[in-house]
Amino acid sequence: MSSTPELPMRDAFSLPINREVGAHRLLNESDKPCTYLCGNSLGLMSKRSKELMEEEINVWATRGVVGHFDHPHKRGWVAIADHVAPYFAEIVGAKEGEVACMSTLTANLHLMMDSFYKPTQERYKILCEARAFPSDQYAFASQARAHGLDPAKAVLEMSPRPGEFCLREQDILDIIEKEGASIAVVIFSGVQYYTGQWFPMQTITRKAKEQGCICGWDLAHAVGNVPLSLHDWDVDFAVWCTYKYLNSGPGGIAGLYVHEKLNDTMKPKFAGWWGHDPSTRFAMPPQFSPIQGAGGYQQSNPNIIAVASLLGSLETFKKAGMMAPLRKRSIVLTGFLENLLFQSKYFVPLKDVEGREKPGFTIITPHDSEHRGAQLSLIFLPMGTGVMQKIMESLQSHGVIGDERQPDVIRLAPIHLYNNEADCETAAKYLNIAFDEVV
């Protein structure tokens, strides 16, 4: 077991118990915490989040509309999202005026794409990974159609080389070099949701800018997972959700980033009253006067309970020291789980996957910590035979909660805020037991 000290944050979260997650084979441990390795899909609830949500519900019950300006906890609803901005800025490496807490991930992606994607006859392509999260793919295709373009020609999707699962950095740079004059927007996932690959964001951004392309990022699986420096990397825009590594709760409020260099040349295209200058917002003027920076893209007042939940988690992040110590812990913990999986008699090296007939698994997430975050994606063999589903059912029956990606992948993510080495050992143990049953 690793000798690296555990960050003292596990007790700051509510851990689901075996009885409640369907661990029917652990009857003698039904009231113990499950082995939750699914924070890359939905992060656990921090106790501080629950406390803040309960406070806001009580303010609503006791003060009603007065809570917008007269709030017992100094979080008047009219400016509650402003409390999030400093945390967002620190986590994504931006200035406070470059970030906004608002809306949902795909809505923000459409907002940014509509603002930045300005195709011309010569420069009209959107460069992305072929296995981008489906919502992103839908958004890119619909943005192309909205401009009268055929998505099959306008959306340029990159696939890994034959027999590989991750994109090579040089291949990405080469296609930007080759197609740069025809590319309007380069937009990848910071961390690829299926493989867990952390793309070389700074290098890709630099290459895109050299070719005159706009460069944006979907940070759904990167924010709170890996260190980011959006401002210094000269990223044009970024969007993210907060319910994964930022633990804001299912469907939690999202975030966006717009580089400050664009303040003088770009104004929000789709105006809403919450993006209006706060000093005159409630005077209800007929003309829109946007907040300078990312805040001007806000449209409607945010869901107070959702913001409170996010704020509670972000306060917990701050207590843990934010991204520097958390990243150090993440590298150790993910490496520890990986080493345990390597020791399984069912582990198959990537080079031996082709033609495999016996049940087994391999890891398609990059081995180098410089190219991954907390997630390990396990692909089950033989592919397309239903092995994964049987393993998934067995794991859950033993209280090990990961998530599946059809047809053959289970993602396991030891989260730096609340998982520990014992969780990794338990997951590896029951993975082997599940295979023993399948075989």
Image (cartoon, rainbow, N blue to C red):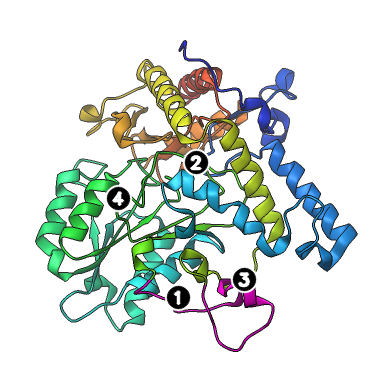
Q: Tell me what residue is drawn at x 35 percent, y 68 percent.
A: 262
Q: Which amino acid does label 4 sit on?
A: Trp
Which residue is identified by label 4? 233
* Horizontal side of residue 157 vs 7, given as left or right: left
Name the N-terminal-most of marks 1 and 2: 2
* Horizontal side of residue 268 vs 51, given as left or right: left
Which of pointers 3 and 1 indicates the residue nearer the eye?
Answer: 3
Q: Position of residue 241 (x, y in %)?
A: 51, 53
Q: Which amino acid does label 1 sit on?
A: Pro
Which residue is identified by label 1? 268
Name the N-terminal-most of marks 4 and 3: 4
C-alpha separation, residue under disc 1 versus residue under disc 2: 31 Å
C-alpha separation, residue under disc 3 versus residue under disc 2: 35 Å
Which residue is identified by label 2? 40
Considering the numbered disc 2 on the image, is that residue within a helix, a strand or a loop? loop
* Callout count: 4
Which residue is identified by label 3? 278
